[in-house]
């Protein structure tokens, strides 16, 4: 019997359109001979499914079911393709766990932790994982510009602490630019993180379970035309994403082993992508994405294809893992 799969997409953040693109790709590539696929839009107005006649059917949030033609549709697995809140920050994960619905993403604590860059780096720093010097602020805190510059130096990055797709991120080169960058970041979040600029090569490492083994996928090097890998570089073709990266084997192994170590240490699940800067063979962790982009042009699908998987096989592997007891 075919499994009912809900592909949730959209969300409440500025990453909504990117999530919709990811969700559409996942829905398209799932094998319709094996799965009944229901794309579910999650937004602040409603959670709903739109049928082939463009009629909208609301999700019953008491048990995440769908009423179609007088029949209740319950889902065997939810494929989570929501970037940002509520799909990447732990809210949906906690909800699904409470009502007993299986899903493809990590558990709610891990989602909340990894979504909070400041807290994630604080947890990983004692494990001898290199991170850039940083300075954090909450909305309403006094802004001590000299103290910021003394701690992180210039240039530096001012970023929203809980946001993805480089939303709310600016590279600051002069002390006089810090206040405006902080104001910009606070438009996206009530917490911000200010980090030292590390002038090195940028790499992205996807990790996921395949055949009951935690696997690091082929590594991607990111070479951007812009000041950094910002929104324009990510989604408007202003960067080269070289997969597999042209790097020496010792560095490839170091990045892969570190990514798998972090995945296991944090007890992550599903697809995750760790971002690094490497300078003088020293590896600095930037962040971890637990709901990475899933369009054909996104990094982790590129890595899966380089690994020898079709997108159909790759997405199905996440469902298979979620169905395991």
Image: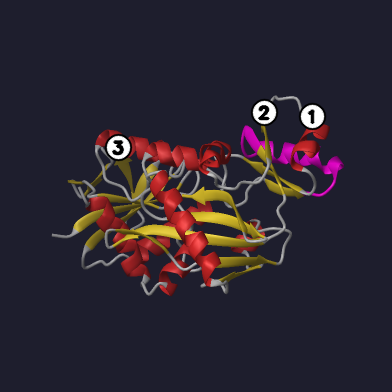
Tell me the residue at 80%/39% (across/down): 149
Q: Secondary structure at mark 2?
A: loop
Quarter of the image containing the N terminus? bottom left
Estimate the x, y position of residue 25 in percent, counting from the top left. Answer: 41, 64
The residue that disc 1 covers is: 144
Left/right placement of residue 53 relative to residue 132 reads left
Tag 1 near tag 2, CB within 8 Å = no
Which of the two discs, 1 and 3, labels the residue nearer the N terminus? 3
Left/right placement of residue 155 relative to residue 53 reads right
Tag 3 near tag 2, CB within 8 Å = no
Estimate the x, y position of residue 280 in percent, counting from the top left. Answer: 67, 61
Which of the two discs, 1 and 2, labels the residue nearer the N terminus? 2
Q: CA distance from mark 1 to mark 2?
A: 13 Å
Tag 1 near tag 3, CB within 8 Å = no
Q: Which residues are magenta?
A: 172-192
- Which numbered disc, 1 or 2, marks the residue closer to the eye? 1
Left/right placement of residue 36 relative to residue 292 reads left
**Front residue of this view, candidates 292 and 130:** 130
Tell me the residue at 68%/60% (across/down): 200
The residue that disc 2 covers is: 139
Q: CA distance from mark 1 to mark 3?
A: 42 Å
Indicate how the structure is coloured in the image: secondary structure
Residue 97: mark in rendering: 3
**Front residue of this view, candidates 272 and 226:** 272
Q: Secondary structure at mark 3?
A: helix
Tell me the residue at 38%/58% (across/down): 208
The answer to whether one can see residue 81 in this image is yes
Q: Is 255 drawn above or below residue 268 in the view shown?
A: below
């Amino acid at each position: 019997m075919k499994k009912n799969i809900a592909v949730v997409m959209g969300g409440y953040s500025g990453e909504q359109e990117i999530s919709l693109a990811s969700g559409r790709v996942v829905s398209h590539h799932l094998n319709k001979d094996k799965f009944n696929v229901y794309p579910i839009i999650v937004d602040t107005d409603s959670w709903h499914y739109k049928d082939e006649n463009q009629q909208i059917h609301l999700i019953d949030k008491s048990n995440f079911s769908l009423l179609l033609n007088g029949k209740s549709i319950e889902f065997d697995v939810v494929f989570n393709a929501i970037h940002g809140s509520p799909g990447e920050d732990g809210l949906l994960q906690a909800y699904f766990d409470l009502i007993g619905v299986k899903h493809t993403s990590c558990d709610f604590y891990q989602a909340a932790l990894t979504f909070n860059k400041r807290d994630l780096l604080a947890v990983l720093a004692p494990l001898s994982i290199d991170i850039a010097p940083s300075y954090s602020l909450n909305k309403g805190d006094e802004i001590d510009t000299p103290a910021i510059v003394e701690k992180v130096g210039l240039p530096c990055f001012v970023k929203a602490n809980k946001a993805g797709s480089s939303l709310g991120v600016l590279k600051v080169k002069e002390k006089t630019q810090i206040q405006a960058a902080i104001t910009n970041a606070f438009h996206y979040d009530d917490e911000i993180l200010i980090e030292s600029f590390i002038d090195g090569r940028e790499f992205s490492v996807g990790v996921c379970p395949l055949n009951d083994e935690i696997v690091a996928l082929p590594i991607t090097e990111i070479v951007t035309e812009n000041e950094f890998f910002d929104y324009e570089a990510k989604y408007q073709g202003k960067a080269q994403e070289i997969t597999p990266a042209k790097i020496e084997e010792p560095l490839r192994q170091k990045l892969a082993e570190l990514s798998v170590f972090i995945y296991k240490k944090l007890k992550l699940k599903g697809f995750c992508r760790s971002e690094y800067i490497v300078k003088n063979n020293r590896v600095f962790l930037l962040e971890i994405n637990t709901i990475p982009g899933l369009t054909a042009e996104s990094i982790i699908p590129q890595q899966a294809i380089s690994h020898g998987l079709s997108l159909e096989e790759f997405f199905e592997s996440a469902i298979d893992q979620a169905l395991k007891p």
